[in-house]
Image (cartoon, rainbow, N blue to C red):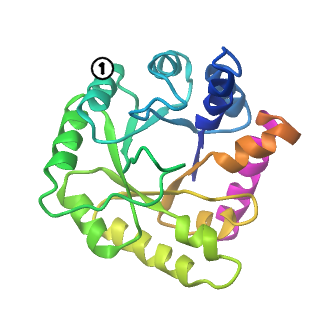
């Protein structure tokens, strides 16, 4: 099970003062020391946190792999093709949202996503689509040429204390995605308290986690926060 750490909120803190600290490159180094298998950042069209220069600097400095989240906007896709991260994860993006609120609403003839996926793949970039755990949407992702899907775990994150319906949905979706020939990732709203049932799903091979790690880094330090998440994920995998 790979653990990718999203460091967007390191840049959020920096942009609050428009200064040069905290530095996402140093944050990525700490995450890698703590056991991260990859670093995730989202280059938004409005540049609210991660900036173009951050992506270039991280591409040079990250020793594991860089996963670039992006909307299917021509300018951002062009930047991704030029920088060439290991992986690009296409996500929905609305300027008024605080964070990504759901998966891509894929249509069978989704020209925009299909073209973005093809452009990224031609640049040698592994392409993942961030989608809700819906069986039909998973099939459309496979038809659009993605290598992987990242299942949106937001419903599970909001309801895990009161029932396991969302977890069952994630299990069904992960198994179906695997049958469709897709690599299966998951993320959104996962915390130290709720991560283990998702990490135990055998078809899921990668988790993307950010907010809870950066939040707890205030108390524990970033390297230790990653180390504690790494331990939980590994324990869940061993018990599954």
Total numbered labels placed on residues in the image: 1
User: Would you name the residue on which mark 1 appears?
Assistant: 82
Where in the figure is residue 208, as x and y percent of width and height?
Answer: 55, 49
Residue 210 relative to residue 95: left or right: right
Residue 226 at x, y percent in the picture: 73, 42
Q: Who is closer to the viewer here, 15 or 193?
A: 15
Residue at (23% x, 32% y) in the render = 74
Residue 100: image location, x then y, percent: 48, 52
| Residue at the limit of the structure toward the right, as seen here | 219
Could you tell me which residue is drawn at 61 percent across and 83 percent down? Answer: 164
Residue 99, image x and y in percent?
53, 49
Q: Is residue 15 left or right of residue 69?
A: right
Magenta-tinted stretch: 223-240
Q: Residue at x 22, y 64 (%)?
A: 140
Viewport quadrant of the C terminus: bottom right
| Near-viewer residue (44 or 197) | 44
Query: Looking at the rendering, which quadrant does residue 150 occupy?
Result: bottom left
Disc 1 crowd rating (10 Å Cα; few below 14, some 14-19, many 20+) is few
- Magenta stretch: dominant secondary structure: helix
- Relative to residue 75, is residue 146 depicted above or below? below
Say whether residue 8 is magenta: no
The quadrant in which residue 116 appears is top left
């Amino acid at each position: 099970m790979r653990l990718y750490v999203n460091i967007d909120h390191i840049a959020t803190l920096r942009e609050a003062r428009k200064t040069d600290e905290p530095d996402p490159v140093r944050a990525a180094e700490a995450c890698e020391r703590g056991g991260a298998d990859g670093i995730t950042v989202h280059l938004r069209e409005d540049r609210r946190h991660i900036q173009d220069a951050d992506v270039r600097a991280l591409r040079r400095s990250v020793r594991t792999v860089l996963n670039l989240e992006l909307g299917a906007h021509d300018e951002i896709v062009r930047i991704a093709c030029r920088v060439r991260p290991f992986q690009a994860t296409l996500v929905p993006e609305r300027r008024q949202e605080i964070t990504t609120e759901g998966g891509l609403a894929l249509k069978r003839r989704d020209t925009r996503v299909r073209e973005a996926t093809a452009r990224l793949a031609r640049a040698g970039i592994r392409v993942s689509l961030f989608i809700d755990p819906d069986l039909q949407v998973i099939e459309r992702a496979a038809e659009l040429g993605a290598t992987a899907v990242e299942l949106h775990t937001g419903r599970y994150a909001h309801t895990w204390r009161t029932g396991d319906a969302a977890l069952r949905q994630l299990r069904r979706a992960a198994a179906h995605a695997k049958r469709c020939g897709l690599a299966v990732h998951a993320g959104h709203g996962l915390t130290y308290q709720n991560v283990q049932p998702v990490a135990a799903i055998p078809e899921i091979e990668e988790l993307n986690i950010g907010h809870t790690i950066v939040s707890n880094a205030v108390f524990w330090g970033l390297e230790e926060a990653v180390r504690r998440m790494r331990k939980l994920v590994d324990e869940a995998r061993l018990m599954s």
